[in-house]
Amino acid sequence: MSDFNLSLDSVARSVNSTMDKLLPAGKGPGGVLMEAIRYSALGGGKRVRPFMVIASSSLFNVDERYALRAAAAVEMVHCYSLIHDDLPAMDDDDLRRGQPTCHVKYDEATAILAGDALLTKAFEVLADKKTHPDAVVRAELVLELARAAGDEGMVGGQMLDLRAEHSTLDVPQITRLQRMKTGALIQVSCEFGAILGKATEGAHHALRGYSHDLGLAFQIVDDLLDVEGSPEEVGKQTGKDQEAGKATFVSLLGIERAREQADLLCDQAIEHLEIFAKKADPLRDLARFVVKRRA
Ligand code: GRG
């Protein structure tokens, strides 16, 4: 394993252990709900967003206990979005992270509620004093995650995406859609380190520039994997965009130009990190990983 893969793995283990404690297995009527939540939230995933929270927090020497709780909250929102995205009313997928999706393993109602509970738990975690002693910091975390996940961010992007199946979008329209659907949560993950660390405006600005470019690169690679990857590699069905007749970066630019664009965005993302010198190496490695990944 490369040094970067080892550190991604180590962050994944720490975040999993934090999430395991925040989402304890339950008994009684709520037991099945918690079982479904734990099935989806603890069953794999690269934990890229938690890595962003941890790596951006380390730029400002944030206490690791705070960073881990903030990272777990972002991952909970991500896991909720995947559960709901897989539902028959949305993408209707049977496979996620190499396992049957939540509604296939349980049922649709349980999957909807598991997603709802993960979303609300994320805000409960952020609002708790254990996440940061300063109430202003906690309020800022809550505000920014709500903005990233809501109608002007991920949920709004998902709505545009559902409607895109019935219309033809051009590159600027796809870019806007993806910045909302995928980019907003990636942006807030990097922003969390700056909020927890009470960073200067300059540092906030640099991280925003980095995550803005990386979020788009991440989505372009996701589109490429849908065309070039296999379900065994990627852990979910592939070829879905083409099957649905959806416009993507790959359908609009072609494989080669989409790959060039992802590489360019990765270089651009890294350029934003100059002010942090060597301390930002984990974020630089992450950007390279995002464009090289095969899953
Ligand atoms: C249902 C409200 C709602 C939103 C859904 C995120 C999303 C919006 C849908 C997921 C569909 C999708 C494949 C989007 C592309 C980018 C993306 C979020 C990929 C999955 O993220 P990874 O690669 O997954 O980080 P792991 O499993 O590693 O966590």
Image (cartoon, rainbow, N blue to C red):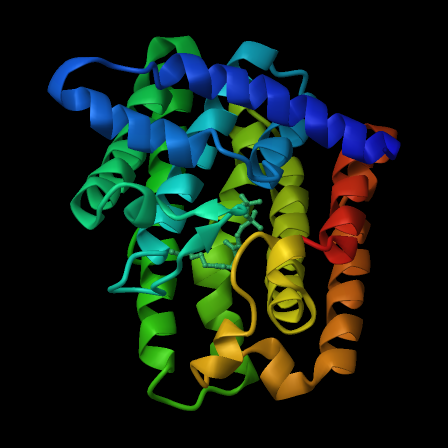
Q: Is residue 60 visible to us here?
A: yes
- Tell me: 291 left or right of 106: right
Q: Which image quadrant for residue 80?
A: top left
**Residue at x 55%, y 78% (from the top left corner):** 248
Residue 199 percent location from the top left of the image: 60, 28
- Tell me: 204 left or right of 276: left
Residue 68 percent location from the top left of the image: 54, 19
- Tell me: 228 left or right of 171: right
Quick one: 273 or 260, which is closer to the camera?
260
Rendered view: 146 above or below 38: below
The quadrant the N terminus occupies is: top right
Rendered view: 269 above or below 220: above
Q: Is residue 134 visible to us here?
A: no
- Tell me: 126 left or right of 109: right
**Residue at x 35%, y 56% (from the top left corner):** 85
**Residue at x 79%, y 28% (from the top left corner):** 6
Rendered view: 256 above or below 20: below
**Residue at x 60%, y 48% (from the top left corner):** 208
Residue 126 percent location from the top left of the image: 37, 23
Rendered view: 135 above or below 94: above
